[in-house]
Image: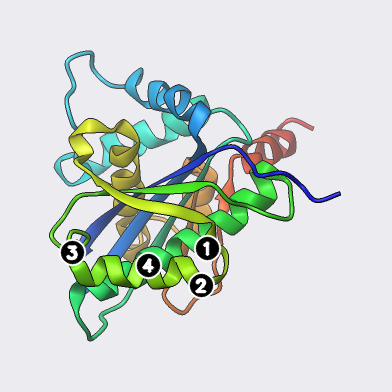
Amino acid sequence: MPQGLNKKILCFVDEYGTAGFGDLYLGAVFVMAFEAGRVDKCLSDLLEPSANEIHATNLADSYLQSLMQRFWTAAPPGRLVMINRKLGVQSGHPPVLYAQALIETVKIGLKRFRNDVLDRATIGNVEVITDANHHNGDPAFSEEIARARQRDGVFRAVNQVVQLDSAASRLLQLADAVAHSRKWIVGAEMNAAGLRQRFGIGSCGWLERPTVISAFAKLSTYASLNP
């Protein structure tokens, strides 16, 4: 019997860097819509009560790493996927480059979410939320997204891509931190395995085989440490 449509999935995407001007790092957070409030609260509860919008670039690495490690410990196991992705310097129209980067990042994350969180063969009913910027507000960005929604593999599961000011969403701020965390690998502070183990963040590159991690890994890590 065919599987019915899954409940709504939210994907939050933010970036570190600028498309078309040096390296670009995207961070993405995938969660069921009905559980987004719970995940939001996990992060908000770790911040000062007076904290407004947080920007990863404005935080000391030591504080951000502590925050992300505590968040990963508090996050509901098996219900969350976080990935970051490095994109090297590319030539082309920046809004199109940004759209292509977003499309490929979302496809990688949705495959993992489908397998590890939904545990099913199909996925649909996805809304992608990006931090509003001059690239994703460009008509060329929208045209590239529309083409991908019609014919680009698992991205056809996406119903819409919307822009939102990150000040209005803790989960966009989380995606910003996930994107920013890639610099810890670039700066050789830790490797991809360390990023996965400490923060639950999977990392992949423009031409690399994607390595993504879901919250199920938390259970595996706990089991290995507590035989």
For the residues labelled 4 and 3, the Cα–Cα distance comes to 15 Å
Left or right, 167 with respect to 123, comes to: left
For the residues labelled 2 and 4, the Cα–Cα distance comes to 10 Å
On the image, numbered disc 3 is attached to which residue?
A: 135
On the image, numbered disc 2 is attached to which residue?
A: 152
Which type of secondary structure does the marked residue at label 4 adopt? Answer: helix
For the residues labelled 3 and 2, the Cα–Cα distance comes to 21 Å
Whichever of labels 4 and 3 marks the residue nearer the N terminus, that label is 3
Q: Tell me residue 217's x, y (percent).
A: 64, 43
Whichever of labels 2 and 4 marks the residue nearer the N terminus, that label is 4
Q: Nearer the viewer, mark 3 or mark 2?
A: 2
For the residues labelled 1 and 4, the Cα–Cα distance comes to 10 Å
On the image, numbered disc 1 is attached to which residue?
A: 156
Q: Nearer the viewer, mark 3 or mark 1?
A: 1
On the image, numbered disc 4 is attached to which residue?
A: 146
Kindly indicate the quadrant of the structure image that contains residue 215.
top right
Which type of secondary structure does the marked residue at label 3 adopt? Answer: loop
